[in-house]
Image: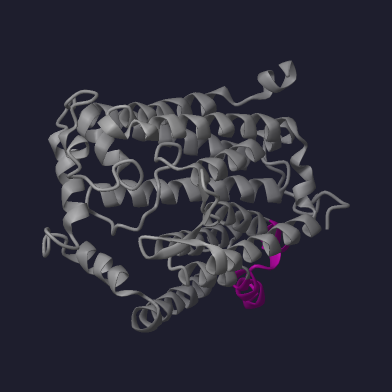
Amino acid sequence: MRRLTQQMDWILIAAIIPIVLGGLATMTSFGSQAGFFLRQSMWIGVGILVVISIARSDMRFLRDSRYIMLFYIGSVFLLMAVLVVGRTVKGAKSWFSFGFFSFEPADIVKLLVIMVLAKYFARRHVEIARIKHLLVSALYVFFPIALIMLQPDFGSALVIGGLWLGMALMAGISKKQILFITAGLVVLFALAWLFVFKPYQKARIQTFINPTADIRGRGYNAYQSVIAVGSGGFWGKGLGYGTQSRLHYLPEYQTDFIFAAFAEEWGFVGTLIVIACFIVVLWRLLVHAQRGASNFETLFCAGYAMLLFGHVMVNIGMNIGIMPVTGIPLPFMSYGGSHILGECIGLGIILSMAKYERATHPDDSNNEFVGYA
């Protein structure tokens, strides 16, 4: 335990703590909804145990393709199972319900997609200019995206697609391939708009383009969120004095709009501190990526950073009215056990990898850990 304490990235941990406490503090001010605070505290406690357990373990077995494929197949199975036996919440069949708690597999699947892409690109980054490898990597994310879209959960599908694009760019795809991907995304979006998107998903995109067109209908959530953020002013209204959340004008104030509820009570200064903490978290993750013991560790750390960055940008963006409302939680802050568990698993893996990282990333890609095919 002493060795683990000495090797722990305390800057990374210290940056996450204010984010977690900010979410908990905001949940204490929800009046009759105090149960959110207690349940979130329980999940955070579980998450801390998960981080410590994984960080103490030797996670180098993840370099083995057999384990990666086993996890990938398991993730696809989970997404198929939730379509059959899952619980429908607000029009999306995305949850397994176990009575006293619910679990959303998409939060774990995002992490497993990062593992699969990190393994694939780590072994083939020299040959990434060949279109074959781009298509194969796209095929790996196609099945999770397709199954998640069937739920339907447009936000999670968009995040996974963004992970693939970001990690492919990091692996070194060419400008021609970027144009090819862009054209493909435009075609896929057009097809999805015609045949896949539900009416409420189209309404969210239309609301994003013109959020004030129907502020009493489909634009209500985004409008109330912007009001909550703006009403916080410079110093905020104070803990427990956020009228938008306490009077239930702000919907989903514990999950999708936790940032707006926090901003109303803590103001510009509080939100600036939270954003600064997220920047520090991303910086430390990129430091670990640079020092990765192999290409796999580098890509995994970078992919995890992309995941958190995407969630932060989308969630804060939809809270201030510049992004469509997609149901993406704010990492370590929004209420919910599934995303907290997924984030803590990823954090634990990175802290475990940090025990074997180098001072600088190896330039020689041929030194790729013999024995882990």
Q: Position of residue 118 (x, y in %)?
A: 65, 55
Q: Could you tell me what secondary structure mostly forms the magenta stretch?
A: helix
Above or below, comparing residue 180 to residue 33 in the picture? below
Residue range of the region highlighted in magenta in the rendering:
119-139
Taking the spot 39% from the left edge, 30% from the top edge, the residue there is 37
The quadrant the C terminus occupies is bottom right
In the image shown, does 255 or 125 lie closer to the viewer? Answer: 255
On screen, residue 88 versus residue 234, left or right, reads right
Residue 231 is one of the magenta-drawn residues: no
Left or right: 112, with 265 as reference point: right
Residue 44 in percent (x, y) is at: 51, 32
Name the residue nearer the viewer: 270 or 89.
89
Q: At 63% across and 69% down in the image, what residue appears?
A: 140
Give x and y (percent) for residue 194: 34, 83
Looking at the rendering, in which quadrant would you find the N terminus? Answer: top right
Task: Choose between 356 and 112: the one closer to the eye.
Answer: 112
